[in-house]
Amino acid sequence: MSTTRPGDERRRAVLERAMHLASVEGLDRISLGELATALGMSKSGVQGLFGTKQDLQLEIVAAATEVFAHRVLREAERADDGLPRLHALLDAWIDYLDTFEGGCFFFAAATEFDGRTGPVRDAIADVAAIGYETLRRQIRLACRLGELDPGTDVEQLIFEFHGAVLQANYARRLLNQPDAYDRARRAIHERLDRARTAQ
């Protein structure tokens, strides 16, 4: 017996288009009417699926979160814990930057909402916290396994890695630098090499 509810396929189609539009134009600029036009639907049809603009924004963030989890977190799970998974996680994160038309959905959304309050801002921050905690867990595990220096400043390493990915997105999208992702990978790998336990 199918568990697909009426409207699920339309909802997925709307969210797919909405994520791409939000990565280009900004999450706050996505309207029910704009999505209806882009998908050849009526505004009332889109409103019937999502209700308010805030409800739509929250569903877009949730859909983008699932994309991030699939493209980055689950992809990295194929590698062994510790340093191999840390490498895989960061490589997948850089690959993910090309998922949406405007680059990383969450970098764009964070820039819009970081100075605000409310459930949309909190949902975006929750995803950032998941990414940070995933990095933190693998760095700490690599330290325990002796793959990284046990005295490694974990939070500093996370800060530098996140900065490298953020800069890759910025340099590729705004500055049209074709080697931005390669430079980010080089920066990350060289930083990990410096953090390795001396053999």
Image: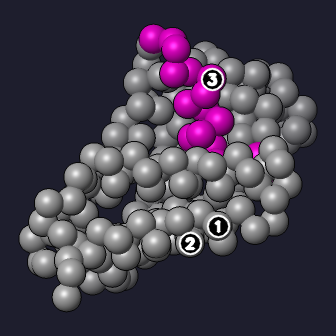
Res. 112 mark: 3
Relative to 100, 70 lies left or right:
left
Locate residue 48, reporting x and y percent. Answer: 65, 25
Give above or below for 39 relative to 122: below
Res. 36 mark: none
**Foreground tag (3 vs 1):** 1
Comparing 123 with 179, the one in front is 179
Residue at mark 3 to residue at mark 1: CA–CA distance? 26 Å
Q: Quadrant of residue 152?
A: bottom left
* Residue at the image position 67 percent from the left and 51 percent from the top: 169
* Residue at the image position 51 percent from the left and 12 percent from the top: 116
Magenta residues?
Answer: 101-117
- Label 2 near label 1: C-beta < 8 Å? yes
Give above or below for 80 relative to 33: below
Locate residue 62, reporting x and y percent. Answer: 49, 40
Q: Earlier in the sequence, mark 3 or mark 1?
A: 3
Q: Amino acid at mark 3?
A: Glu
